[in-house]
Image: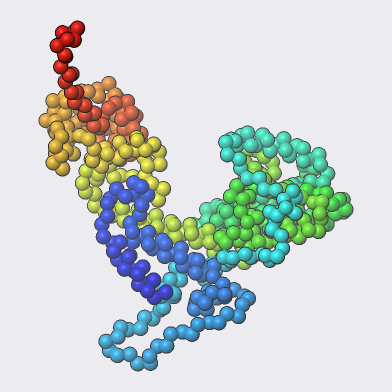
Amino acid sequence: MSSTYLLFWEFRRCGEVNVDPTLPEAGVPPLSLRLDHIYQRAAARVAAKIDDSNPTYHRLPQKYRNRPINHNPIIPPLPITPIQRKRTFPTVPTKSPIDLLLSTVPTDIEIASPGHILDPWRPDIQDKGYRERFKVSPAVKGISKEEAAEAHRKHIARIANDSRAIVVYTDGSLIHDGGHNRAGAGWALYTKGIERAIGSTGLGTTAEVYDAEMTALSKGLRCAIDFFTNTHSYHIDTHTSIFLFSDNTSAVRSISSAAPGSSQSESQDFLEVARGFLDGHPQASINIEWVPGHRNITGNDRADEIAKAACHLEPQTPKTTLAHYYRTVKKSLVDAWKNAWTETPRRGNYAIADRLPPSILGSYPFRQYDRATLGLITQVRTGHGHFGEYYQRFNIPEPYDCPCGAVIQTRTHIIFECPQYDEARHIIYTAAPDGHIGTLLGTKKGIDGLAVFLRQTKAFRKPPTPTPTSPPPPLAEDDPAS
C-alpha cells in the first residue's frame, strides 16, 4: 500500500507539467486531475467492496468496518515499528496511506459485495427452471418512444381483461430542492385497470435517480406479492402473472443481476423475493418490462407523480450510494478541469479557437462530426494544416503564397478573403456575422458553418501532386505511323 501510495503522488507531481492544450478536444483531462479521479474511485472500492475475507479490511479505520463478520481469516500482523527512531529517519506520518486513501469517502458509503451474494447452490433466476416464468424486456433499439407507447397501450388493454394479472408501474425521480438534489421512489398497483395500492419512499440527498428506479422496482414487487397474498381471489389462483413496468431501461436490465455496484442490495432483495414467490407458486410468473416515460401512459404518469412527492420524504436508513459518490467525484473532476482551463493563459494559433469549456466526452466537433470532417476542422482551428502560413512557420518546402496571388496564404485569408471561395463565403458570414475568426473557430454555430464551408469547397486541402509522365517510346523505322 505504501509503495503504491508514493508512486501515485510521484505520478501526480509529474502530471503538473504543461501538456498539449489540444488534448481537451479528445476529452483528455490533465494527468494530475485524472489521477485524482482514479484515486477517489479506488478509495470507494476499498471502502465499499472488500469484506472481512480480505486482510486489507482489518486494516481499515474502525468507522469503515461496518460489515458483519462472516469469516475468521488469519490476520497478518502489523509491521513492527521501532520505539525510538534515529534523527536521520523521516517523521512518522500522522495518518497511514490507507487513512489518506479513504479521506474522500463518506463513512455511510453503500456496501457492495464483489462476489456472489446469493447462495450459490440455489438456482439462478435465469436458470431453465425460471426462464419461462421470469422475463426481462428492456427497451428495443430502433423503435421510437411513440411506437413503444402505442404497443404498450395495446399490451395493457389485453392485460386489463385478465383477472389473474397484477400490474405495477414504478418510477424514480430526482428534484432540486434547497440547494440539493433529492431522490424518491414511487409505485402504483393496478388490477383490471383500477388502481388498488400505491407506495413511496424517500432516498434523501445522497442517492441518484438510478437508485430510486431500482428501489421502486424492488418495493413494487413486494407490493404486488403482498396484494397477491392478502387478496383471496388471487391467492387461490396459482396462475397469477405480475407485470412490473419501469421507464428506466438500465434499472430493468440490472434489477435481476445483483451486480457489485450501486443499489446492489435492492437487486438482492428483489431476487430473493422473486425466487421465493416463484418457488412457492410454480404456475405464477413475473415480467419486468420497459415502458416509455412521459407518453401519457396513465400508470407511468401516476408512478412519476408519486415518486416526485416522495423526494421530500426522509430516508429510513440514510446512505451514500455508489452512484452518487461516483457522480460527485466525476463532477469534481469536471469542475476542477474547467477552473484550470479558465485560469490557463491562451497561447499559440489555437488560442483564438479555445473558447469552448472542456468536457470528458470530448469537444463539440469531436462528438459531432465524422473523422474526415473533424480532421479538417481541427487543422483549421489549431493552425496546423495545408496552407502557406503553416509551411512558412515550420520551414516546409511548399509554396507559401496563395494561387490567387496573396503573398502569404493564411487561414484568415482563405476563409474571409480568397476569391476562389467567394461563392461559399455567405456560409461563413451566416455562421460568424461579425466576421471575426474567433467566432467562427470558437463557437458551436461557427464550427457548424466552417464544416459546411469545408464540405462545399476544396479549402485547406493539399492539392494532389501531379504524376510525372514518361515520354512515349521512339517509333521503329518500319512502323507504318512513321
Q: Is residue 172 visible?
A: no
Residue at 26% of width from left, 31% of height from top? 461
Left or right of residue 354, residue 399 in this image: left
* Of residues 358 and 317, the one drawn nearer to the viewer in this rendering: 358
Residue at 78% of width from left, 44% of height from top? 194
Residue at 36% of width from left, 52% of height from top? 28
Give the image location of residue 76, x and y in percent.
Answer: 50, 82
As drawn, 410 above or below 137: above
* Of residues 10 and 441, the one drawn nearer to the viewer in this rendering: 10
As drawn, 219 above or below 82: above
Left or right of residue 88, residue 139 in this image: right
Q: Is residue 284 visible?
A: yes
Give the image location of residue 472, x and y in percent.
Answer: 18, 18
Left or right of residue 455, residue 129 in this image: right
Locate the C terminus by quadrant.
top left
* Of residues 212 and 124, the one drawn nearer to the viewer in this rendering: 124
Residue at 67% of width from left, 48% of height from top? 136
Which image quadrant is residue 101 in? bottom left
Left or right of residue 270, residue 437 in this image: left
Question: Residue placed farthest to the left in the image?
Answer: 407
Q: How many marks?
A: 0
Question: Residue placed farthest to the front in the image?
Answer: 478
